[in-house]
Image (cartoon, helix red, strand yellow):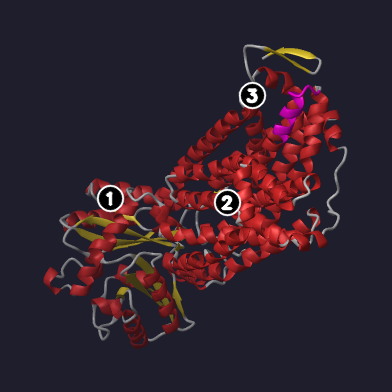
C-alpha cells in the first residue's frame, strides 16, 4: 500500500485538479436527479393495491385523486372555478353537481346520498382527478396551479397535496440541514483537533465526496426525499473518522520521518489498511437495507453504501493532497487540543467492571421491553406542521364532511348492476363508511346508459373495469381504517374475485404489514453480515458475539427510550435505525478489540491488556461519536419534517449510547470472557498468555 501512497503524493496536484473538475458533472447529476416525495410508491409493485393504482392510470387515466372543498360560493361561482380548474394541465376530470345535471336544475333533484356526500352547510365539494400519479411532477405542478386559481375559502386535500407541501418544505430545509451539520462538526473538530485549519480541509474533502455521491444518484433515476435529506448528513457523520485517522497517522509519521511526503505515503498506507476494513461493517449495515421489500430501504442503502465508498476514496486521495499543499499553513495554525486526555479511564473501568456488568443486566431487560413496545406511526401527514395548506384542507374535509380518507373500488365492468347495488348496500353498513358512489348512485338506476354523460362514464367506467368511490370517517393508518379496509375488501371479493380496493388507506395498510416483515429481515441480515465480517477479521467465534451484543444492547436502549417518554416514532425508524447504528458504531468496538488482542497476545496480563485497550481507544471513540452526534443532532432539532427529525435524533442519541456502551461495557465483557476469547481463537496448539497456559 505504500506504493499507492507514494503515487498519490507524487500526483497530488493532478489529483486536486481532477477532483475539482469532477465536481462539474457531479453537480449536473445532482440537479438532474429526480426526487420522489411519495413514500407509498416504494411498496412492492406486485401487491394488489399497487396493481390497482396502475389500472387506474392505464384504464381511467387517473393517477391521483383529491377532494376540493369550497366555502361560501354561489353555484355559478363554483361552476366558473370548476371550469378554471379543468383547464389546468394534468387535471383529468373535475366531478361536481353540474357534471351530472345542468346548474339550472335544483340540487335537491339529485339522489339524497350524493347531495349529502358533496354538500354541507355553505360548503360544497368537488372530486378532482389527475392524469399522472400521486407524486409525479405534473401532478404537483397542477396542485400549485389550482392553489393559485383558488382563493382562501378553497381547500385542496389529498395525498398529492401533502406530497407537494412535503416537497416545498423539504427543499427549503435541506440546505439548512447541511449548514447545521457542517457548523456543529466544525465546533466538535475545533475542540478535538490540534489545528484550526484542518477541520476545514476535512469538511472540504468530505463535501467533495458528498457531491460525488449525490451526482452519481443520477444513474439511479430518482431518490426519495428522505434519502436526499439524510445522505449528506449521514455521510458526513460516518466518514469523518477516516479523515481523523489519516491526520493522526500523518502526524505520528511526521514525528518519525523527516520528509513530509514520505510521512504522508506511510499515513495513506496505514489509513487504507485500517479504514477499508472498518468501512466494511458500515457498508454492510447499509447494504442490509437493500433486503427490504419496501424499496425505500434499498434507495437509502445503495446511496449510503456508495457514499461510504466515495468517502474512503477521497480520504486516501483528495485529503492527503490537500494536507500536503497546505502543510505550512497547517503547521502555523496548530494548537493544543482542548479535549482532555481522559487519563485513568481504562484502569477505572477494569477496577469496577462488575458494577458495569450489573448495570448492563439491569438496563438490558427494560430496554428490550421498551424496544418491543415503542409505538410507531404510519400516517405520513400526522406530524407535519399544522399550518401547511394540505393539512388545513384535510382538517377542513373532516370538519365539514366527516371524511378522513377516500378509497377507490375497482370492479369488473361486466359485474351485474344488481350485484353492484347489493354490494354497495353491504359496504354502506360497514362502520365508518359515509357513502359508496358509482354511476348508479350518481345517476340512479332508471337512467339508461346512452343518456349518461360521456365524460362521467369515462371517469367511472372502462371496457374492463368500473370504479366506485368510498368515503371513510377514519384516519389513514388507524386500526379502525385498517379493519374497515379488510372488511370492504372481503365484501368486494365475495361479489367479484377480481375486484380490488385501492387508495392511500389500503396502501398504508399494506405498508404496515410489509415493514413488520422487513424489520425482522433487515435485523437478521445486518447482524449476520456484520457478525461474519468480525469473525473473519478476528478469527474468533466469541468476539463477534460479544461485540454485536454490546452494540445491540445500545440499540435496545436507544429504541426503547421513546416508549418510556411516550413518543411515537416514524415506522421507517424502527426498520433502519438499528441497522445504521450497528453498522456505523460497531467500529468503536472493533477499534478497542483490536488493541485488546494485540496486548493480550503480546503477553500482557488480562487486566492490564483490557485497561490499555480501553485507555488507548477512549479518545478516538469519543471523537468519532461526537462527530456523528454533531452531524445529526442539530438537524433533528431543526427539521419540521418529523420523519427526518426523528431519524436524526435517534441516530445522534444512538451514537452517544453506543459510545458509552463500548467504553464501559465492552472492557467489562473482556474481563469476564477473557479465557473464552483466548480459547475460541485457534484450536490445536499451546500458547502462553501472560502467566496462564491455555489450550488454543
Q: Is residue 82 above or below residue 662?
A: below
Disc 3 is placed on an element classified as helix
Mark 1, secondary structure of its residue? helix
Q: Is residue 207 magenta?
A: no
The answer to whether residue 113 shows anywhere in this view is yes
Residue 600 lies in magenta, yes or no? yes
The mark nearer the N terminus, 1 or 2, is 2
Q: Which mark is residue 492?
A: 1
Other-residue count near label 3 (Cα within 10 Å), few / some / many at <14 / 14–19 / ≥20: some
Q: Which mark is residue 160?
A: none
Q: Is residue 383 visible?
A: no
Single out the mark in the foreground, 1 or 3: 3
Asked if residue 20 is positioned above or below residue 553 in the image, the reply reads below
Residue 356, percent from left and from top: 79, 32
Location of mark 3 (residue): 542
The image shows residue 83 at horizontal and vertical percentages of 31, 83
Amino acid at each position: 500500500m505504500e506504493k499507492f501512497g507514494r503515487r498519490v503524493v507524487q500526483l497530488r496536484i493532478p489529483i486536486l485538479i481532477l477532483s475539482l473538475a469532477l465536481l462539474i458533472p457531479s453537480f449536473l447529476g445532482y440537479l438532474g436527479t429526480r426526487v420522489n416525495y411519495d413514500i407509498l410508491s416504494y411498496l412492492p409493485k406486485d401487491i394488489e393495491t399497487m396493481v390497482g393504482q396502475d389500472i387506474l392510470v392505464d384504464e381511467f387515466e387517473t393517477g391521483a385523486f383529491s377532494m376540493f372543498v369550497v366555502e361560501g360560493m354561489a353555484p355559478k361561482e363554483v361552476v366558473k372555478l370548476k371550469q378554471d380548474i379543468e383547464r389546468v394541465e394534468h387535471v383529468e376530470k373535475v366531478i361536481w353537481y353540474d357534471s351530472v345535471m345542468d346548474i339550472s336544475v335544483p340540487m335537491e333533484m339529485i339522489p339524497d346520498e350524493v347531495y349529502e356526500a358533496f354538500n354541507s352547510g355553505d360548503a360544497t365539494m368537488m372530486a378532482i382527478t389527475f392524469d399522472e400519479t400521486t407524486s409525479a411532477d405534473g401532478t404537483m405542478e397542477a396542485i400549485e396551479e389550482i392553489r393559485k386559481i383558488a382563493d382562501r375559502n378553497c381547500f385542496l386535500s389529498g395525498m398529492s397535496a401533502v406530497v407537494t407541501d412535503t416537497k416545498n418544505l423539504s427543499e427549503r430545509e435541506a440546505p439548512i440541514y447541511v449548514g447545521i451539520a457542517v457548523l456543529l462538526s466544525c465546533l466538535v473538530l475545533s475542540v478535538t483537533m490540534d489545528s484550526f485549519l484542518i477541520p476545514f480541509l476535512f469538511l472540504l474533502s468530505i463535501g467533495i465526496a458528498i457531491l460525488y455521491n449525490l451526482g452519481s444518484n443520477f444513474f439511479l433515476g430518482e431518490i426519495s426525499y428522505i434519502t436526499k435529506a439524510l445522505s449528506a448528513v449521514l455521510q458526513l457523520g460516518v466518514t469523518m473518522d477516516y479523515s481523523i485517522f489519516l491526520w493522526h497517522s500523518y502526524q505520528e509519521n511526521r514525528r518519525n520521518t523527516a520528509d513530509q511526503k514520505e510521512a504522508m505515503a506511510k499515513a495513506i498506507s496505514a489509513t487504507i489498511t485500517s479504514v477499508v476494513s472498518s468501512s466494511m461493517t458500515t457498508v454492510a449495515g447499509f447494504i442490509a437495507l437493500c433486503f427490504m421489500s419496501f424499496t425505500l430501504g434499498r434507495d437509502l442503502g445503495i446511496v449510503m453504501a456508495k457514499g461510504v465508498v466515495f468517502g474512503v476514496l477521497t480520504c486516501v486521495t483528495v485529503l492527503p493532497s490537500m494536507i500536503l499543499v497546505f502543510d505550512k499553513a497547517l503547521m502555523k495554525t496548530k494548537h493544543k487540543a482542548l479535549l482532555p486526555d481522559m487519563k485513568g479511564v481504562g484502569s477505572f473501568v477494569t477496577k469496577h467492571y462488575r458494577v458495569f456488568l450489573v448495570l448492563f443486566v439491569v438496563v438490558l431487560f427494560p430496554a428490550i421491553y421498551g424496544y418491543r413496545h415503542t409505538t410507531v406511526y404510519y400516517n405520513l401527514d400526522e406530524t407535519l406542521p399544522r399550518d401547511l395548506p394540505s393539512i388545513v384542507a384535510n382538517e377542513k374535509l373532516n370538519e365539514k364532511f366527516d371524511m378522513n380518507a377516500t378509497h377507490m373500488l375497482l370492479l369488473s365492468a361486466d359485474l351485474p348492476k344488481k350485484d353492484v347495488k347489493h354490494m354497495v348496500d353491504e359496504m354502506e353498513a360497514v362502520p365508518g363508511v359515509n357513502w359508496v358512489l358509482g354511476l348508479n348512485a350518481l345517476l340512479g338506476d332508471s337512467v339508461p346508459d346512452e343518456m349518461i354523460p360521456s365524460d362521467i362514464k369515462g371517469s367511472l367506467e372502462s371496457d374492463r373495469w368500473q370504479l366506485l368511490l368510498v368515503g371513510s370517517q377514519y384516519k389513514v393508518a388507524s386500526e379502525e381504517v385498517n379493519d374497515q379496509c379488510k372488511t370492504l375488501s372481503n365484501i368486494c371479493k365475495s361479489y367479484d374475485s377480481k375486484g380490488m380496493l385501492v387508495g392511500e388507506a389500503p396502501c398504508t395498510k399494506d405498508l404496515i404489514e410489509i415493514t413488520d416483515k422487513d424489520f425482522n429481515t433487515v435485523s437478521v441480515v445486518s447482524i449476520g453480515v456484520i457478525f461474519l465480517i468480525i469473525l473473519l477479521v478476528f478469527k474468533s467465534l466469541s468476539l463477534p458475539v460479544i461485540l454485536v451484543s454490546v452494540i445491540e444492547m445500545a440499540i435496545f436502549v436507544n429504541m426503547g427510550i421513546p416508549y418510556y417518554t411516550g413518543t411515537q416514532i416514524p415506522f421507517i425508524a424502527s426498520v433502519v435505525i438499528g441497522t445504521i447504528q450497528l453498522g456505523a458504531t460497531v467500529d468503536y468496538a472493533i477499534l478497542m478489540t483490536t488493541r485488546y488482542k494485540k496486548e493480550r497476545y503480546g503477553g500482557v496480563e488480562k487486566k492490564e491488556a483490557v485497561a490499555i485497550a480501553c485507555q488507548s481507544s477512549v479518545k478516538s471513540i469519543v471523537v468519532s461519536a461526537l462527530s456523528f452526534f454533531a452531524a445529526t443532532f442539530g438537524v433533528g432539532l431543526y427539521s419540521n419534517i418529523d420523519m427526518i427529525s426523528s431519524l436524526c435524533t435517534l441516530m445522534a442519541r444512538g451514537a452517544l449510547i453506543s459510545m458509552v456502551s463500548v467504553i464501559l461495557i465492552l472492557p467489562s465483557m473482556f474481563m469476564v470472557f477473557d479465557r473464552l476469547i483466548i480459547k475460541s481463537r485457534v484450536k490445536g496448539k499451546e500458547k502462553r498468555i501472560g502467566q496462564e497456559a491455555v489450550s488454543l
